[in-house]
């Protein structure tokens, strides 16, 4: 393990000497993650991207990419672009990245089932803003807006999200 790693513990996320409150998927932590199970997958997941809403926040780092109108994430297991960033118009099942709520104002993308996605293994394990403390996600790891920003500003290219079975 490296000091750059984000380590999920039963008490929160450990990063750079801090323990940061977070929420995980409503399906708990699972080694056998599947699409739609609501689980946060066990593993060592590299942080491979950072997206942000330029109309709402400034870029936390120079390598952050703006979320533009029409940016989507494919979650259709039958689609060749499954678990990839895609653009509207897009007929297959997808998730809007430019949302009305603030959940995706800042998104850290993990390499879970990416870039070569296996159909049905699960898509889009992000680190993003929570709805409220204790409210579970669909499998992602979520934080308060302030804590997510603090994390994003300190990430280094070798950062990993480490999730162990409990």
Image (spheres, rainbow, N blue to C red):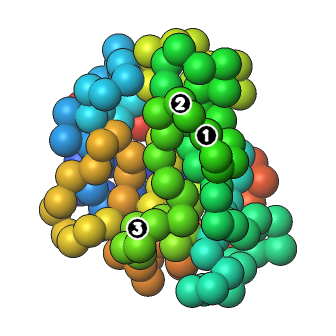
Give the numbered dot on residue 103: 3
Numbered disc in front, either 3 or 1? 1
Q: Quadrant of residue 13?
A: bottom left
| Residue found at x 64% / y 46% | 89
| Residue found at x 27% / y 34% | 38
Is the residue marked by circle 1 packed among few (<14), some (14-19), or many (20+) residues within 10 Å? few
Figure check: 31 above or below 124: above
Q: Are marks 3 and 1 in contact (CB under 8 Å)?
A: no
Nearest the viewer among 97 and 137 is 97
Q: Secondary structure at mark 1?
A: loop
Please state if 164 lies on the left or on the right of 74 as rendered.
left
Residue under label 2: 92
Which badge, 3 or 1, is on the more N-terminal residue? 1
Residue 34 location, x and y as percent? Answer: 36, 19
Nearest the viewer among 82 and 135 is 82
Tell me how far mark 2 sits from mark 3, CA to CA.
Answer: 22 Å
Which badge, 2 or 3, is on the more N-terminal residue? 2
Residue under label 1: 90
Please state if 164 lies on the left or on the right of 47 as rendered.
left
Q: Are marks 2 and 1 in contact (CB under 8 Å)?
A: yes
Is the residue marked by circle 3 packed among few (<14), some (14-19), or many (20+) residues within 10 Å? some
């Amino acid at each position: 393990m490296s000091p750059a790693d984000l380590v999920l513990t039963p008490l929160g996320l450990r990063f750079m000497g801090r323990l940061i409150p977070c929420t995980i998927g409503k399906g708990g932590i699972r080694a056998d993650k599947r699409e739609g199970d609501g689980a946060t997958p066990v593993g060592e997941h590299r942080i491979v991207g950072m997206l942000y809403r330029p109309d709402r926040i400034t870029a936390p780092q120079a390598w952050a990419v703006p979320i533009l109108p029409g940016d989507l994430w494919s979650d259709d297991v039958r689609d060749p672009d499954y678990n990839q960033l895609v653009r509207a118009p897009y007929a297959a099942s997808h998730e809007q990245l430019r949302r009305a709520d603030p959940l995706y104002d800042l998104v850290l993308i993990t390499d879970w089932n990416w870039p070569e996605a296996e159909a049905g293994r699960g898509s889009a394990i992000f680190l993003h803003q929570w709805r409220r403390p204790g409210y579970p996600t669909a499998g992602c790891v979520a934080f308060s807006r302030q804590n997510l920003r603090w994390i994003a500003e300190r990430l280094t290219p070798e950062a990993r999200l480490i999730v162990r079975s409990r």
